[in-house]
Image (tube, helix red, strand yellow):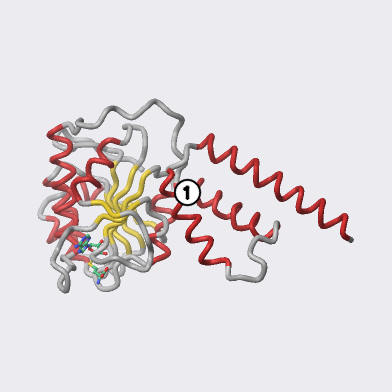
Amino acid sequence: MTEKTSPSLTRSNIRFVLVRTSHPGNIGAAARAMRTMGYARLVLVAPLHYPHDDVIALAAGADDVLENIVVVPDLATAIADCRLVLGCTARQRGVPLPELSPRDGAERLHQAPPDDEVALVFGNERSGLENEELMRCHAAVHIPSVPGFSSLNLAQAVQVLAYELRLAALHGVSLLPPPLKSDPLATAAEMEYFFGHLAQTLIDIDFHKGRAATTIERRLRRFFQRAEPEQRELRILRGIFDDAQRMARLAGSKKE
Ligand code: SAH
C-alpha cells in the first residue's frame, strides 16, 4: 500500500480499516477525523457505496487520505500483513477478547516497531463487527460510553481513536520500557494459516471425539492471539503439529 507523504502526517504503519460502511458520508468524515490527527492510511472493506460524492463532501479537503484509500473485499485481506490488530466495539460481544481503553489501545499501536504494520478496525454503522471479524483481532477497544446508549457515530469513534493516537505520538509514550528485541511477530495471514493447521491437527488426532469443534477452536484462537506469537514460535508449533499428524497417520495404518 503506497502513501504520499506530507510533513503533517504522522506514522505510516498504522492503518484505519472501516468494514462494510453503509453511509459514504461517514467515510468522508472518518477521513477528515484521521487527517486532523495526522493519519492518512484508510482501508475500506466492501463499502456499500463507494466512490460517492458524500465521501468528498464530508472529507472537507482531506485529500491525502482520499487519494490513498484502498478498497478490499474482506477483513482478512485488509489486515493480512498486520502484526497487531485492534477492533473497536460499541458493546461486548459473544467473543471474549481482552478489552483496552482507547488510550491503552492507542499506546499499544504507537509502540509497535515502525516496520510492523498495525490496524485499527471499525464496524458497520448498524451491525458493528461480526464475531468472526472480532476473532481476528488481538484485542477490542471500547470507548467508555454509557450503558444503554453505547454506540457513537462511526466517524466520531474514529475521531476519538485518532485523537488518542495523536496524544500518544505527541507525548512519545514511554513510561513503559522499550520492548525487548525479538523476532518479528506473526502476521494475521500467518496466524490464519496456523489456526487452519491447528484445527486440522485436532481432527487428525481425534481430539474432539464427536464434540463440536467450534468452542474449543475459539478458545484456542483467543489464547494464541493473546500470546502474540513470533514467527519462529509459530514454526515450532507447526513442526509439533506435523509430527502429531504423522504419528496419527502411523497409528491409523497400524490399526488397519
Ligand atoms: N450497533 C453497533 C454499533 C455500530 S457503530 C454495535 O453495537 O456494534 C459503528 C462502529 O463505530 C462500531 O462498529 C465501532 O467500530 C465504532 N464504535 C461506536 N461506538 C463505539 C464505542 N463506544 N467504542 C468503540 N467503538 C465504537
Q: Which of the 4 quarters of the picture holds residue 64?
A: top left
Q: Left or right: where does residue 151 sit relative to residue 46?
A: left
Q: Quadrant of ligand 1?
A: bottom left
Q: Position of residue 102 (x, y in %)?
A: 20, 51
Looking at this view, is 55 or 120 the one in front?
Answer: 120
Q: Position of residue 176 (x, y in %)?
A: 24, 32
Image quadrant holding the N terminus, namely top left
Specify the amino acid type for callout 1: Phe
Identify which residue is drawn at 20% across, 30% down.
174
Q: Left or right: where does residue 124 sit relative to residue 252?
A: left
Identify which residue is drawn at 29% across, 51% down.
120
For disc 1, does the CB lie below 8 Å from ligand 1?
Answer: no
Image quadrant holding the C terminus, namely bottom right
Q: Left or right: where does residue 255 sit relative to residue 79?
A: right
Asked if residue 179 is positioned above or below residue 121 in the image, the reply reads above
Looking at this view, is 152 or 228 the one in front?
Answer: 228
| Secondary structure state at the residue bearing disc 1 | helix
Q: Position of residue 200 (x, y in %)?
A: 64, 57
Q: Which of the 4 quarters of the picture holds residue 208?
A: bottom right
Identify which residue is drawn at 33% across, 67% down.
93
Q: Left or right: where does residue 208 sit relative to residue 151?
A: right
Residue at image mark 1 = 224
Badge 1 density bin: few <14, some 14–19, many ≥20, Cα 10 Å: some
Number of numbered tags placed on the structure image: 1
Q: Position of residue 10 (x, y in %)?
A: 19, 37
Q: Which of the 4 quarters of the picture holds residue 199?
A: bottom right
